[in-house]
Image: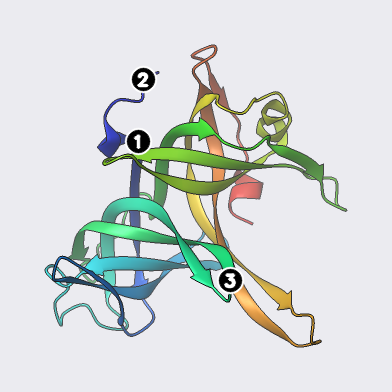
């Protein structure tokens, strides 16, 4: 397994419904970028709400709240310094976007492939219900000596396997982006609801043995 083509290290395809108005994000060399939220249905009754960043050059007035779209791009991270604290912010960077027809359905509305390096020792744990989970932080190289740091979560046999992964090890992951809400509590006793994002792993391959680890975790992936 080689990590040579930066554009292939991080690929994502999403299909869903725009559920927020666009809001200005930032400007690079005179090119403005905007963010909107995309709702992606799971096989269950739940949905994931994913932030999407898109250039003003490809974002037209046709892309409004309620519009169903298909997106190809990358899952990227950047550091946001706020109140002297560093926060990792995750977003889908759009390379191509198109409107889905009324009867058009995507074969897989949420698919991501990452090829990167373990940058923290994976944390293995079990839930009160006995589910096995490993938390992984993956560093994915990008052009111009940049990297994206993507939190991933593995389940079941994949989670047990991840216990043996070491920092610096090359790993390729197939999965989907999921969102979850949590309550952030502050020292003054107040709290607020926030949303976190991570890649839920359904398959992985390590450079150590070039062997696929395929696990049918349908119940976990679609919970």
Q: Say which element carries label 1.
A: helix
Relative to 60, residue 15 above or below: above
Q: Is residue 103 left or right of residue 200?
A: left
Q: Say which element carries label 2.
A: loop
Estimate how packed mark 3 is, as few (under 14), some (14 to 19) or many (20 or more) residues with alpha carbons within 10 Å.
few
Q: Say which element carries label 3.
A: loop
Relative to 54, residue 159 above or below: above
Q: x and y percent of residue 34 in the render? A: 28, 74
* Circle on res. 205: none
Query: Which badge, 1 or 2, is on the more N-terminal residue?
Result: 2
The residue that label 2 is drawn on is 2
* Circle on res. 9: 1
Q: x and y percent of residue 59 in the render? A: 17, 73
Q: Nearer the viewer, residue 172 or 121?
A: 121
Estimate how packed mark 1 is, as few (under 14), some (14 to 19) or many (20 or more) residues with alpha carbons within 10 Å.
some
Instruction: Name the residue: 53% across, 29% down.
Output: 204
The residue that label 3 is drawn on is 84
Q: Quadrant of the N terminus?
A: top left
Q: Is residue 10 left or right of residue 220?
A: left
Instruction: Name the residue: 58% across, 76% down.
Output: 83
| Residue 144, image quadrant | top left
Residue 43 seen by the camera: no
Q: Nearer the viewer, residue 219 or 124?
A: 124
């Amino acid at each position: 397994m080689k990590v040579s083509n930066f554009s292939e290290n991080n690929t994502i395809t999403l299909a869903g419904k725009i559920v927020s108005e666009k809001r200005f994000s930032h400007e690079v060399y005179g090119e403005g970028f905007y963010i909107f939220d995309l709702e992606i249905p799971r096989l269950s009754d739940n949905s994931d709400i994913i932030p999407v960043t898109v250039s003003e050059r490809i974002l037209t007035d046709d892309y409004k709240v309620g519009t169903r779209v298909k997106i190809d791009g990358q899952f990227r991270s950047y550091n946001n310094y706020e109140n002297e604290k560093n926060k990792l912010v995750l977003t889908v960077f759009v390379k191509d976007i198109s409107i889905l027809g009324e009867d058009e359905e995507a074969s897989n509305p949420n698919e991501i492939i990452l090829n990167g390096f373990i940058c923290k020792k994976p944390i293995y744990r079990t839930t009160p219900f006995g589910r096995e989970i490993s938390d992984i932080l993956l560093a994915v190289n990008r052009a111009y000596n940049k990297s994206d740091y993507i939190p991933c979560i593995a389940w079941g046999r994949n989670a047990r396997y991840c216990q043996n992964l070491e920092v610096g090890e090359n790993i390729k992951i197939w999965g989907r982006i999921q969102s979850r809400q949590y309550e952030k509590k502050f020292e003054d006793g107040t709290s607020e609801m926030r949303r976190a994002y991570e890649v839920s792993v359904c398959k992985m391959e390590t450079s150590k043995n070039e062997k696929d680890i395929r696990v049918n975790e349908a119940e976990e992936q679609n919970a």
